[in-house]
Image (cartoon, coloured by chain):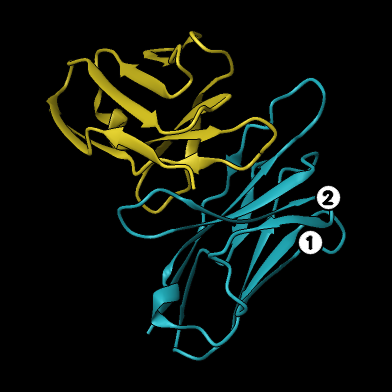
Amino acid sequence: DTGVSQDPRHKITKRGQNVTFRCDPISEHNRLYWYRQTLGQGPEFLTYFQNEAQLEKSRLLSDRFSAERPKGSFSTLEIQRTEQGDSAMYLCASSLLGPTNTGELFFGEGSRLTVL
Amino acid sequence: GQQLNQSPQSMFIQEGEDVSMNCTSSSIFNTWLWYKQDPGEGPVLLIALYKAGELTSNGRLTAQFGITRKDSFLNISASIPSDVGIYFCAGSIQGAQKLVFGQGTRLTINP
């Protein structure tokens, strides 16, 4: 399977704990995105990377959230001191930005977080 | 920030019927994308549109990029049970690669 993969698919944690999600993008894609989706809503942009550089962060990304893409391949999204309001589906997407393409985003299956 | 409004929010149709949904924006977009999402899964890209007025088909799906650049339409012909799901429009503005998503249209099909 050469699509975007995310791990874990489901995570249940207690309030105050830290959680980390991993995303492996499509191998030749240079851009990687994190989105958050709550029930009944469309995905909301959190942040994105071009190669290893984090180019933009949403105001939704509080200080408790940190994302990395250390080698320009996989990425991690860490949430510290989780709160119940963090419960959501965290979606990763990747795209290939180049002179002859338009950067269509391809999404993974998501990591669903439940904070008790 | 940019807002996308999708309508209708939900649709209940009979199998075999045609479906139309649309998405409007207060801002001009230079790319419109349509995605479908099944429960517990990530969105899957259906159609991408890059030019105002463009009409693109993918099997039974047809989408159009509005001439004003502020709207887009998705039509599904002869619906089948596997068309059930939530359809999202998404747009990006010039120079920005991030997508803004609508709230989704939930499609339910009665056999």
Q: Residue at x 31, y 17 (%)?
A: B76
Q: Quadrant of the N terminus of chain A?
A: top right
B75 vs A15, left or right, is: left
Count how many numbered circles sit on residues in the image.
2
**Label 2: how many Cα within 10 Å (few below 14, some 14–19, many 20+):** some
Q: Quadrant of residue B51?
A: top right
Q: Residue B72: x, y in percent? A: 40, 21
Q: Residue at x 50, y 42 (%)?
A: B100
Chain containing the residue with disc 2: A
* Residue type at the position of mark 2: Asn
Q: Which mark is residue A51?
A: 2
- Front in this rendered view, residue B34 or A13: B34
Q: Quadrant of the C terminus of chain A?
A: bottom left
Inter-mark Cα distance, 1 to 2: 8 Å
Circle 1 residue: A69
B39 vs B14, left or right, is: right
Q: Residue at x 35, y 52 (%)?
A: A41
| Mark before the other along the chain sequence, 1 or 2 | 2
**B109 to B15, vertically: above or below:** below
Mark 1: which secondary structure? loop
Q: Assess whether mark 2 and mark 1 are in contact (beta carbons under 8 angstroms).
A: yes
Q: Which chain is cyan?
A: A
Chain containing the residue with disc 1: A
**B29 to A47, vertically: above or below:** above
Residue at the extreme right: A71
Q: Residue A71: x, y in percent? A: 87, 59
**Label 1: how many Cα within 10 Å (few below 14, some 14–19, many 20+):** many
Q: Which chain is yellow?
A: B
Q: Residue A29: x, y in percent? A: 77, 40
* Residue type at the position of mark 1: Arg
